[in-house]
Structure formats: structure tokens, C-alpha cells
Image (spheres, helix red, strand yellow):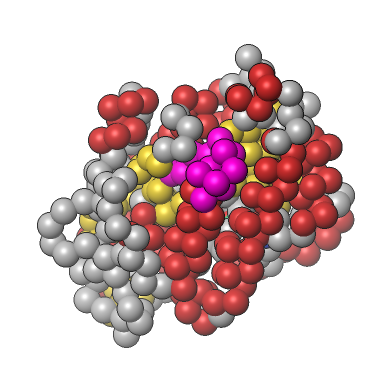
Amino acid sequence: MTKKFLVTGGAGFIGSAVVRKLISSTPHQVLVVDKLTYAGNLDSLKPVAGSDRYGFVQADIADAQRMHEVIGGYQPDVIMHLAAESHVDRSIDGPGEFVQTNVVGTFTLLQAALAYWSKLEPVRREAFRFHHISTDEVFGSLGAEGFFHEEYPYQPNSPYSASKAASDHFVRAWHHTYGLPTLITNCSNNYGPYHFPEKLIPLMILNALEGKPLPVYGKGDNVRDWLYVEDHAEALILVAEKGRVGENYNIGGWNERANIDVVRSICQLVDEMAPDQAIGPREKLITFVADRPGHDLRYAIDASKIERELGWRPAETFETGLRKTVAWYLQNQAWWERVRSGVYRGERLGVAV
Ligand code: NAD
């Protein structure tokens, strides 16, 4: 059955992967709702821009009137909520924006969704889903052992993860208190094409390519669990369509890597795929810098629930996904040059609101 998906944050890294997959692999309609902050990039939606099943609205999720208008006007079957401030370092420098978008914005969207949902006819009311997309960072930091499972206690440590934890709690409460049919997913670190170059993997690829220093926090021994963004997008669509209402699902690829090993792998791939004698072996560009305050040591996801209940499996290993990612940045210089120069922001002032 064809459904109407409303995707908040659809111009961001993961949201745009979800939208590209919804248009390429399903019969569904998609409306993106995005404020187009610095992280929103319409270039990442160019592959779907010509589809008559795709639409775009520039709006802030914290704008209650706009959310009521957009949701009421579009009449979605599914809301996938990805809009957020997402960069931990930015949350340390300026936490206010994170509270505003991630907490107040999610609350505002929930209220608009609830008002809309409560007036739907019974069949559509039953089928409606509000899918909130969140992070494994809400669980805090692991020692050397163990994994984050769905019952793991919330222990957020950064302003970013605290704001996401708060938003998860609001979504849970709107299900338990008002009966809104919600789903929550908590995913590990994503990487892949169209990733904003402030994040670890694209930053290292581009700096390695250009022979610039590769800054690594502390000794590089913090461990992250990596998932290729297209595997995440696939999992999200599966949960939105088949997940059990009111449930949480953890999503991860069982791919734990110390940051320094990730950077070394990138150096080797860039050396192999873009050799440059003037630069030489990229590993010598690695420079250790003062650690991020409150830097969580280790994240690792136990993804057995989504695997067992929904049959999801990631298609990529870290090695195959990283190779594809490096190849994508090498082949899509125009995309990242427009991001780094800021051109992508200036041009979109002409976007219809
Ligand atoms: P991103 O920063 O790339 O994109 C966020 C998008 O939200 C941007 O397009 C931005 O313009 C939009 N946005 C920001 N504030 C808004 C507002 N007030 N109203 C409307 N739109 C707004 O983020 P991402 O990496 O794609 O992450 C998407 C979601 O997935 C976030 O909720 C994040 O917490 C979660 N998540 C991310 C990761 C990861 O590794 N990137 C992992 C797990 C979960």
C-alpha cells in the first residue's frame, strides 16, 4: 500500500539517505520538513528532486503553528522524525540550540502529531506511526565489556545526548499517556556518502586527500560502533513499516573500532585510491589533540532485537562501507566543495517556503 511519509530533517545526512531510499525502493510519497540549518543541504536531495512523489517544505519543527499547518495539510501516515542539532562539539560550545530543537522541537512536533492523529478516522488512526530517530549516546559510556541493549539505563553525558535522551522520554510519554503510536530507534555512529565534513570520517578523508593534519582526540582510543548510513536507512524504513508500536529498537552493525584505527584505515584507503607522492603516506599526518571534555570511552550496540524481530541485517561490513565512502568522496568533489565553501547555503535562499 502506498503511504505518505513526512520526514523531518530530510535534508541532513541520515534523513536524506532515508528519503533517497524511500523514493528509489518503495512506492511511498515523501514530504521533507527541514529548517535548513548549516547541516541541511538540498544538494543531498538532488537525486530525488525530479520525482513526483517527493516534496519539500522549509520549516522549523519548534514552530507550533507551522507544524499544525504542514501535518494537517499533508495528512501523513508516518512521521519519521530526524530533525535535530547533531554535533557533540557544537553542543558543548552552545547547548541552547540543542535544547530548543531537540527538546522543544520534538515536544512541538509531538503535540501537532497528536492533534492530527486524534482526529483521524479509526483505520488510519490505527495505522499511523510516529517514528523518533535517536542515538546510542543516550546510554552514556561503556567500559571494555558489555553492549547497549534496549533496557540499558539512560545516562547521557554530553549536552547533545542529554537533549536526545529528553526527546526520547517525551516520545515514550506521548505513547503511554496519550496512546500516540510511536516507535523509537537508537543507532550507533553512522558514516557514508553526503556526510557533513565536520564529522570524523569525512573530515579525515578530505584532510588526508589534501595532505592536511589529521587531528585525533586524546590517544585515539575511544571506541565507536559504526554503521553504513544506507544500512541505517533500510533499518529505519523497516521499523516504520513493521516495528511493534510503543517499542524501542537499537540499531548497530557490530562494528566497534577505536578512533585511531578508523583514521589509519582511512589513510590506507586514501593512499591506495588517491596516491600522491608529494604528500607521501597519510599516516604521518595524524596529530593527537587535547581530548574532548567528558569524552565517552566506548559505545557498542546490541542489535539482536531488530535482527530477531524484523530480520534486519546490515549489508556492509566496516571495511566494505569505508571503501565505498572514500570512493564516494573522491568521485563527488563538487558536493563537498560546495559545502566547504558555503555555496550550498547561499543558493538555497531561493527555496520555496
Ligand atoms: P544532520 O545534522 O546531518 O541533519 C539534521 C537535519 O535537521 C538538517 O537537515 C537540519 O537542517 C535539520 N534541522 C535542524 N534543526 C531543525 C529544526 N529546528 N527544524 C527543522 N529541521 C531542523 O543529522 P544526522 O546525522 O542526519 O542525524 C539525524 C538524526 O539521527 C538526529 O536526530 C540524530 O540525533 C540521529 N542520529 C545520528 C547519528 C549519526 O551518526 N549521525 C547516529 C544515531 C542517531
Q: Residue 268 in the image: state x and y as whole percent.
A: 27, 56
Does the magenta segment cover residue 24? no
Query: Residue at coordinates 46% horizontally, 73% vertically from top-left?
Result: 159
> How many numbered discs, if any?
0
Left or right position of 122 against 272 = right
Query: Residue at coordinates 37% horizontally, 25% vertically from top-left?
Result: 310
Left or right position of 276 against 261 = right
Q: Residue 54 in the image: state x and y as whole percent.
A: 73, 33
Q: Residue 200 in the image: state x and y as whole percent.
A: 40, 64
Q: Residue 70 in the image: state x and y as whole percent.
A: 80, 44
Along the line of sight, the residue nearer the viewer: 215 or 55: 55
Query: Residue at coordinates 71% horizontally, 36% vertically from top-left?
Result: 118
Along the line of sight, the residue nearer the viewer: 328 or 96: 96
Query: Residue at coordinates 71% horizontally, 32% vertically from top-left?
Result: 76
Res 106 quadrant in image: bottom right
Along the line of sight, the residue nearer the viewer: 214 or 317: 317
Residue lying farthest front?
177
Quadrant where ligand 1 appears: bottom right
Please report the bounds of the magenta region as a residue range: 173-185
Does the magenta segment cover residue 177? yes
Tell me, yes or no, if residue 141 can be seen here: yes
Residue lying farthest left?
145
